[in-house]
Every structure is written in structure tokens, then in C-alpha cells.
Image (tube, rainbow, N blue to C red):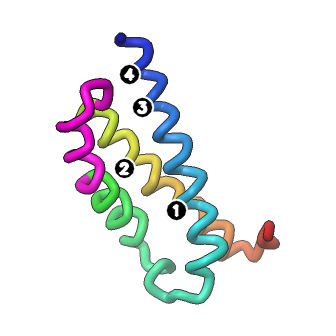
């Protein structure tokens, strides 16, 4: 059961990172708030707070998984911001 929980946590982190990065690049491209330095922190905290009740309900998802997911979302937002500032082309 321990290995399955770890795989779920890392899978959720991977999905959170890639989806947050793509969302910032594609949907939030013209939103000024995403360019603020606090945007990744706010996104990570909100994702963690939303994921914690899921951790309480599901037995394989722990609070550490929720924190890992929130951290990955924050890093995804930061990566999307960085790509926008560099002017990389958007993959449609």
C-alpha cells in the first residue's frame, strides 16, 4: 500500500505541474496578475488547501501528497510565467 500511495502522490504532482504550466501559457497569457511574483505561491497554497479535504477522505492520499501537489502546481505556474516572459511559442 505504501508504494501505491507514493505513485499516486508523484502522479498527481506531475499532472498538477503540467496542467498548471499549460493553463498559464494558454489561458492566462494576457492576465496581468499571473506576472506578479506572488502568483506561484498563491496558486500553490490554493491548490494545497483544495487538495487537503481530498486527503482526509481518500485513504491512499495523504496530507503530504496534498502538499506535494500544491508545490508542483506552484512550480508549474512559475514555469508558465517564465515561458511567457521569454516569448516562447505556444503549443496549440
Of the numbered discs 1 and 2, the one sitting upstream in the chain is: 2
Instruction: Read off the residue under disc 4.
Output: 5
Instruction: Specify the label residue 9 is tagged with.
Output: 3
Instruction: Specify the label residue 30 is tagged with.
Output: none
Magenta stretch: includes residue 53 = yes
- Answer yes or no: do the residues labelled 2 and 3 have beta carbons within 8 Å? no
- Answer yes or no: do the residues labelled 1 and 3 have beta carbons within 8 Å? no
Distance CA(mark 2)–CA(mark 4): 16 Å
Distance CA(mark 1)–CA(mark 3): 20 Å
- Does 73 appear above or below 43? above
Of the numbered discs 2 and 3, the one sitting upstream in the chain is: 3
User: Circle 1 sits in a helix, a strand or a loop, which is it?
Assistant: helix
Distance CA(mark 1)–CA(mark 2): 12 Å
User: Circle 3 sits in a helix, a strand or a loop, which is it?
Assistant: helix
Q: Residue 69 location in percent, x, y?
A: 40, 44
Question: Exactly how many numbered labels are in the figure?
Answer: 4
Classify mark 3: residues with Cα within 10 Å, few (<14), some (14-19) or many (20+). Answer: many
Of circles 1 and 2, the one toward us is 2
Classify mark 2: residues with Cα within 10 Å, few (<14), some (14-19) or many (20+). Answer: many
Of the numbered discs 2 and 4, the one sitting upstream in the chain is: 4
Of circles 2 and 4, the one toward us is 4
Classify mark 4: residues with Cα within 10 Å, few (<14), some (14-19) or many (20+). Answer: some
* Residue 41, quarter of picture: bottom left
Of the numbered discs 4 and 1, the one sitting upstream in the chain is: 4
Distance CA(mark 4)–CA(mark 1): 26 Å
Residue 19 appears left or right of 43: right
Classify mark 1: residues with Cα within 10 Å, few (<14), some (14-19) or many (20+). Answer: many
Instruction: Read off the residue under disc 2.
Output: 70
Instruction: Read off the residue under disc 1.
Output: 78
Residue at the image position 79 percent from the left and 70 percent from the top:
92
Give the magenta part as a residue range: 49-61
Of circles 2 and 3, the one toward us is 3
Amino acid at each position: 500500500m505504501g508504494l501505491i500511495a507514493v505513485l499516486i502522490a508523484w502522479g498527481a504532482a506531475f499532472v498538477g505541474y503540467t496542467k498548471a504550466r499549460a493553463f498559464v501559457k494558454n489561458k492566462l497569457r494576457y492576465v496581468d496578475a499571473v506576472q506578479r511574483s506572488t502568483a506561484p505561491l498563491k496558486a500553490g497554497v490554493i491548490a494545497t488547501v483544495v487538495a487537503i479535504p481530498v486527503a482526509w477522505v481518500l485513504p491512499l492520499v495523504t496530507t503530504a501528497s496534498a502538499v506535494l501537489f500544491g508545490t508542483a502546481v506552484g512550480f508549474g505556474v512559475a514555469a508558465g510565467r517564465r515561458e511567457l516572459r521569454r516569448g516562447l511559442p505556444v503549443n496549440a
